[in-house]
Amino acid sequence: MILTDYYIFLGSGLFIIGVIGVLTRRNVLIILMSIELILNAVNINLVALSQYFRSVDGQVFAIFVITDAAAEAAVGLGLIIAFFRNKETVNADEIDLLKW
Amino acid sequence: MLELATFITLSIVTLASAVMVITRRNAVHSVIWLVVTLAAVGGIYLLQHAEFLFAVQIILYVGGITVLFLFVVMLVDIDVALRQARFARQWPVALLSSALLLGILGFVLYNHAKGINLPSRPLISAPAQNTQAVGMALYQNYMLPVEIASVLLLVAMVGAVIMAKRKLQ
């Protein structure tokens, strides 16, 4: 038997890995991929609790999260292309135009 | 028993490939490992009898978003990124704060696992009805959010086109 807890532990683990990726990597593309990992961790929790409460609402919410992930990926990658065209880099440390 | 073995296998694949995503030097390799991660997460949905979400995960994430990532990785100059250091300067602080977050999450989850003790419960409905149930919920209770999500996608589409356009008139 798989307890709901196990899914939540798995979701936490994936979330932590995503957070580490966002905080430590320099490549903006990999930071975006880490954000996708975080959203997937959230979805695992939503589906697990949706099964636990015997309600389909969690799964509907997960679909909205996937919609947001698609929108975020499209806009984020558009931003990266626009930035790369101007500064020829995808290094997060060099994106410092607004730094004072 | 078989269910638990499947779950453990899928968990290990998910976590290991997620670690590979954030440690690879080449962004193309990261995208490939991201595909593995997303497919394994899809397997976890299937294990919970969320068939519709599994299909959405495969079609949208594995088939759509990762291809988008791959396109952009190919568009931007990989050679430059390959020569630079992989991790940012602040990585010790980042790892420390992540370990702190892990500690807090683990502590809270462990205490609650003892207190609430979520038991394993039978499924909501027969697997064959999952897609029907999700569709009913989407088009009855969540009518307005679906419309808002469609507007969001439209805005994102226009935004992506504007961002990637070479010159605005």
Image: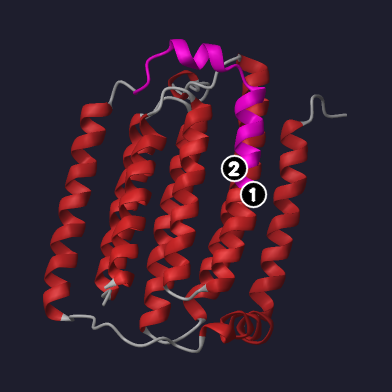
Residue A18 magenta:
no
Q: CA distance from mark 1 to mark 2?
A: 7 Å
Q: Which residue is mark 1?
A: B63
Residue A22 located left or right of residue B126: left
**Element on which disc 2 rests:** helix
Percent from the top left, x then y, of residue A73? 60, 44
The reply to whether dot 1 and dot 2 touch (C-beta < 8 Å) is: yes
Residue position marked by numbered label 2 in the rendering: B66
Classified by dominant secondary structure, the portion drawn in magenta counts as helix
- Look at 65% across and 48% down and name the residue there: B64
Q: Does residue A28 appear anywhere in the picture?
A: no
Q: Dot 1, crowdedness within 10 Å: few (<14), some or many (≥20)?
A: few
Q: Quadrant of the N terminus of chain B?
A: bottom left
Up-down relation of residue B101 to residue B122 (above or below): above
Q: Say above or below: B93 vs A94.
A: below
Counting from the top left corner in percent of width and height, residue A46 is at: 42, 70
Magenta segment range? B65-87
Read off the chain for label 1.
B
